[in-house]
Amino acid sequence: MIRVLAGVLGAAAVLAFAGGAERAMAQGFGAQTFSALARVDPAHSWIRDRKGGLELELALSQGVPYRIFTLDDPRRVVLDFREADWSGVQGDGLLRSDLAGEATMGLVRPGWSRLVLSLNAPLALQRAALKIDPDSGSAVLTARFIRVSASDFAARAGAPYDAAWALPPAVQKAAPPRDDGVLRVLLDPGHGGIDPGAMRDGIRESTLMLTFARELREALVRAGVEVWMTREDDSFVSLEGRVERAHELGADVLISLHADALAGGGARGTTVHTLSKTATDEASRKLAERHERGDILAGVDLSHSDDVVADVLMDLARMETQPRSEKLADAVVNGLRSAGLPLNSRPRRAAGYSVLKAADIPSILIEVGFLSSDRDRANLLDPVFRAHLSGAVRDAVLAWHLADKAEAPLRRQ
């Protein structure tokens, strides 16, 4: 069985351990063979309201270490698992509740996955247990949450510290050596891991943008550009982590790639976005909010406001960088137009995208199309179209780089 380190109502979290084959053998489970992943069985799993509270039951192919805790602003329950596979599990299929608004699951870092429940009311963990079948090794995780006051919820919220779960401390990496004059680009495939981004007809924005980023990287590398990526697989990277990566690399340019979806399906064609404290339109404001979603799902603390002095200093730094970002965005729009690629009727937009907040690195966000548009979706699934698109973006970036180098002496004055 499991060893519960913290539980019962009043504890901030449950941390439990139900190890792999070695522990199973030691507990007399017999010669049970365990796979690397615990697979979640959606047919025997559910989240529902019961007796005034919220109850959860997850059927797993084997026992794994897990922990449960709550986070505030916005209110959510987080369940972390070591080596749990959520393939084929849909949040809508699990959720039968008015107390929980949404269930999302996926990777948060290699070897660790997460289930996040957004809450419509303040709830606290009352009990949790993991029961392992001694014959098959399969397991069932149950948990119950009950209503508490908003102040009580806030007091209990927060991820507990435990060395087994903690991320390693951030280490500032030295920028890799580079050749003078060679453009260094950081490509940022949007979303990933627990945050798949937009989804239509089985297509995940995170997967599609990783594919396009790899193709764009190839096009740029063949043109002599040095290219790096914020992620190389379906993993979660926080917005702050993406910007930090740009600084670690000493990147000359950050290009974030997305293919979102908007209600109604009316939006279509490529749009290119730059940073602005005030959104140019309502659609851009909503897109910026959607792009923050990954950090919320992954449990990143969003409660800290920016330091006022740091904000002022960054604004001063952006006085030089922002015009360069604007010119890069204009170059991409003009390049796509010259290549005859489909542009949105308003292709240049701006909003408060966190991934564009590197004060000293020209940064743009390209919505290469909208998955909510049948035409855009078909285009983005076509490798010939994507090759045309990546070539046009490459040519635009190279044209901008030449012009930017010519203007560099004027900026120094």
Image (spheres, rainbow, N blue to C red):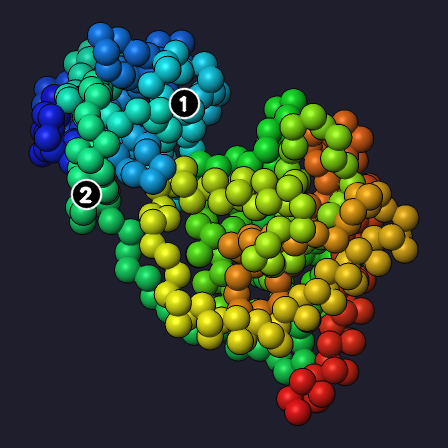
Pinpoint residue 142: horizontal percent, then vertical percent: 22, 17
Relative placement, left or right, of 257 versus 76 is: right
Height in image: 250 above or below 122?
Answer: below
Residue type for callout 1: Gly
Label 2 crowd (10 A; few <14 / some 14-19 / many >=20): some
Relative placement, left or right, of 406 versus 242 is: right
> Which quadrant is home to the N terminus?
top left
Label 1 crowd (10 A; few <14 / some 14-19 / many >=20): some
Q: Which type of secondary structure does the marked residue at label 2 adopt?
A: loop
The residue pinned by badge 2 equals: 160
Pinpoint residue 125: horizontal percent, then vertical percent: 19, 25
Q: Residue at x 74, y 67 (%)?
A: 327
Most extreme residue toward the bottom, as rendered? 413
- Between 69 and 285, the one nearer to me in the picture: 285
Residue type for callout 2: Pro
The disc at residue 101 is 1
Q: Residue at x 22, y 38 (%)?
A: 154
